[in-house]
Amino acid sequence: MTPILFIVAIVVAEALLPRDVHLGPLLAVAPALAAMFSGPWMTGLSGLLALLALLFAGRLRGGLSTLNHQVQIASLVLIICFLVIYCLLRERRQRELAQVRSVSEAAQRVVLRPMPARIGPLRVASVYLAAAAEARIGGDLYAAARTDGASRLLIGDVRGKGLAAISDAAVVLCAFREAAHRCAGLPALVGHLEESVARNLAELGSAGYPHAVEFFITAAVAEVPDDEPVVRLISRGHPPPLVLRGRRVLKPRFPDPAPPLGMTDLVTAGQAVETLPFRAGDLLVLYTDGVIEARDRSGAFYPLAERLASWQDGDPEALVCHLRDDLLSYVGGRLPDDAAVVVVERSDRTPDLGTVH
């Protein structure tokens, strides 16, 4: 409607103003406005109306045979053609972008399944922020599985980011989902993950993948038993979790960190299982390094522990939403690396076995 009103206003002004004042060239604004907000058909229609208005104004000004009017008409026709072509190309790109988003969403549902809102006595919430433009997933990963008398959680980070890391993340996720139900202990489960990563590296190397020797995955595998107020954890080069207890943020220490998955040659001992107190009402915060390595404009890292200390609500879903918004605001809206957060709350009543130091 705005382009049509603009055309009418130009024609009326052209008829009322002195003959030596020419507003005809301004009619090119009408199809330009249509191109900003509409598709090629509306742009073409606005251009046709502008052209008819220019012809009408030319007749009012003494005919269309003058060189000035002929140049104006030719210029307007050329502008209309360019604008229609632009709209066609824009619509094609929008269709392609919609297809990419559809594929990305499908990949997310297949590779990175949504975390269950509740698993055993635990309430779970998660958020994923991909660094790659238009991507929904990348190199960060998380998963949960229910076993007899316990719940198991995985969070990890593939070397690299964006869409190129999806296939590597899928290897670990599939291995975890398969082995979490049949491996009796965490060391056996992590050992199975290591074997799967090693096989994947061998396949990549035999296929001539140039960066296979540099491939690794940091991961943390946790197990929360139903009948004990603890969480058992094996960390393979992954940032340590945080426990939010009221207004206190408890930071566990891992004296002997193991190398990431994929660096089998560096593993010199068995898998060390750390046991952390995790009582009813506590929030266990698992995260990837994309969270704590995010920087603001001054170059300061995101202070996750300080941000958690200011949180008062005990709802996991509300916490991950708060962290997502706060993190994006901290970095100015765009993350340089993939980031994932999983928050777990124990909602049962079990005796307290101490605190985290």
Image (cartoon, rainbow, N blue to C red):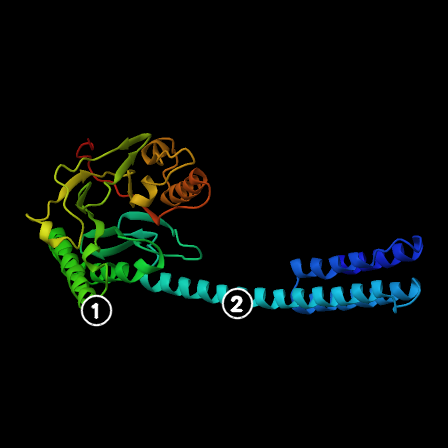
Q: Quadrant of the N terminus?
A: bottom right
Mark positioned earlier in the residue sequence (1 or 2): 2
Name the front one of labels 1 and 2: 1
For label 1, count other residues whose C-alpha is less than 10 Å away and answer few (under 14), some (14-19) or many (20+). few
Left or right: residue 247 compared with residue 145? right
Kindly indicate whether the residue at mark 2 contacts the one at mark 1 (C-beta within 8 angstroms): no
Name of the residue lying farthest toward the left: 269
Question: Foreground: 313 or 296?
Answer: 296
Type of amino acid under label 2: Arg
- Identify the mark at residue 277; answer none if there is no mark: none
Left or right: residue 268 compared with residue 76? left
Q: Is residue 242 visible?
A: yes
- The answer to whether residue 37 is above or below residue 227 is below
Number of callouts: 2
Question: Foreground: 109 or 278?
Answer: 109
Question: Foreground: 101 or 77?
Answer: 77
Q: Residue at x 28, y 47 (%)?
A: 122
- Identify the mark at residue 95; answer none if there is no mark: 2
Q: Position of residue 37 (x, y in %)?
A: 66, 59
Per the model, the C-alpha gap separating discs 1 and 2 is 34 Å
- Residue holding disc 1: 207
Q: Residue at x 41, y 41 (%)?
A: 327
Q: Position of residue 269 (x, y in %)?
A: 6, 47
Q: Position of residue 90 (x, y in %)?
A: 58, 64
Type of amino acid under label 1: Ala
